[in-house]
Structures are given as structure tokens and as C-alpha cells.
Amino acid sequence: MSATQSTTTSTTTSTTTSTTHKKALVVWGGWPGHQPKECVDRFVPGLEADGYDVTLADTLAVYEDAAALAETDLIVQCWTMGEISRQQTQGLSEAVAAGTGLAGWHGGLCDSFRASPEYQLLTGGQWVAHPGGQIDYAVDILPAAAADPIVAGLGRFEIHSEQYYLHVDPANEVLATTTFGAHPEAPAVEGVVMPVAWKRRWGQGRVFYCSLGHSPADFDVPEAATIINRGLRWASR
């Protein structure tokens, strides 16, 4: 079952015959270089198959509708850079604190609104750099997280993508990491072990993030797609 395209002023909802009836709001936009619509399209069919009623929105105005957010079980955001209003930040933060889940990947969640520290406090991290651009690097599952449902059964894997260097909240529960090599343009990063995937609580809500996902091709790596698929469902109310 498919949903029709959303516009900048409206959203569309797909229905399902499942008895689960969970609601997911998928918000996409911002810098087009991260192919936000193409990336969210990789995960919407799976959510629908799992019984979610999925609403697609390409406007941040949806964060101003407190009643709709209160009925939403999961917000998936893919919106790199741009600006968010104080009202929208407050609406999103309050919805998550009340129990709505928030999840996303790469710049779509943790390089979204650089001028909003309130938003960054909610997500638990902020992009700083990706030395070398798109490179080959390894992702390691933390031994302490091996039994976590988001990464259970997964081991070390390789990916060709942007290796994100982030400022990270120490309150995050880290699930996976990457270790930086030598980069002439950023000599201080060599040997740094950086979180790749984490989860956290915000009031009654759950927040999940994974730094993979520069382009839809990242999700062709089975481990990357698995981590994000599981993370979305973990974050859901």
C-alpha cells in the first residue's frame, strides 16, 4: 500500500488493515544533498507493513500541532540543516517528553538545526565534521550492548560513507562506535572512538540516533539498515 506525495502545505496518510494501529509521522526536508525523501522512502514501507499508519510531512509546521503529536507514537525526522522556530522546538520536545518516540539518522536528526541548542539537548548530539568526506571505515558494536535489541546479533562491519565526528551528550546509551584514523585536515581526531548509534530517554519518550545514512546507498549495507529499522521500532511509544 502506498502513500501519495506530500506537499509543503499538507500531509498524506496511508492506512493499513493491521490491528496494531500505531501512528508514525515522517518529517523530511532541509538540505537536498542528503536525499531526504529517497532515504525515508527506504523505511516507510516497512513501517506500514508492521501496522503503522504513516503520515509524510515536508514542513516543520507539524511540530506546532500538539494534539496530533500527542496521538503519534513515532516521529522519524530526516531534515538536514535549516531553521526551526522556538514554538516548533517546544512542540517537538514536549511531545517526546510526553511519550512520543523520536528517531533518525545522519544529518537528518543530529545536524538539523545548528542554531538551536534546545533541539540538540533533545537529540543528544550535534555534527561537527566528517574528515575525509566519504571514506571506508568500520563500525563496532559495543560489547556491553551486545544483547540490546537494536544491535543484538550484529558484529563489526564496514561501510563507505561520511564518518561523523559529533559533540555527544554523555547521558546517551551508546550502542555502536567508530574509531578515527589519521586525517591531515583534522589531526586531533586520530584514534578518537566516536559513538555511531545511541539511544536515550527524554521524559517519558525514547530517542534513537544513528550517524550512518549519508545517502540511500548506506542502507544497502545490511547492518546499517537493521540498526535503523530496529531503532525506529525501539523509539516508538
Image (spheres, rainbow, N blue to C red):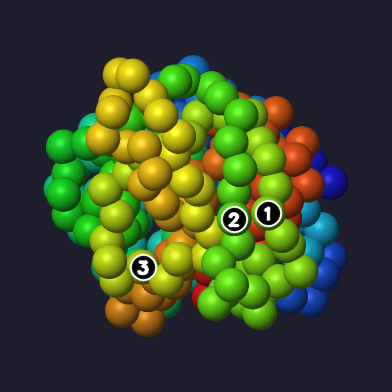
Q: Nearer the viewer, residue 167 or 59?
A: 167
N-terminal-most mark, 3 or 1: 1
Residue hosting label 2: 140
At label 1, which amino acid type do we have?
A: Arg
Q: Are marks 3 and 1 in contact (CB under 8 Å)?
A: no
Task: Give the structural element (helix, strand or loop) at label 1.
Answer: loop
Image position, residue 159 (x, y; %): 66, 36
Does any portion of residue 112 appear in the rendered image? no
User: At 29% from the left edge and 55% from the top edge, which residue is drawn?
Assistant: 168
User: Looking at the rendering, which quadrant does residue 100 occupy?
Assistant: bottom left
Task: Judge the density around disc 3: few (<14), some (14-19), many (≥20) Cα neighbours within 10 Å.
Answer: some
At label 2, which amino acid type do we have?
A: Asp
Q: Nearer the viewer, residue 21 or 115?
A: 115
Task: Give the structural element (helix, strand or loop) at label 3.
Answer: loop
Quick check: 7 above or below 105? above
Quick check: 205 above or below 184? below
Image position, residue 55 (x, y; %): 59, 49
Residue hosting label 1: 156
Q: Are marks 3 and 2 in contact (CB under 8 Å)?
A: no
At label 3, which amino acid type do we have?
A: Asn
Image position, residue 117 (x, y; %): 16, 49
N-terminal-most mark, 3 or 2: 2
Quick check: 177 above or below 112? below
Q: Are marks 1 and 2 in contact (CB under 8 Å)?
A: yes
Gap in Å between the C-alphas at discs 1 and 2? 5 Å
Residue hosting label 3: 172
Does any portion of residue 158 appear in the rendered image? yes
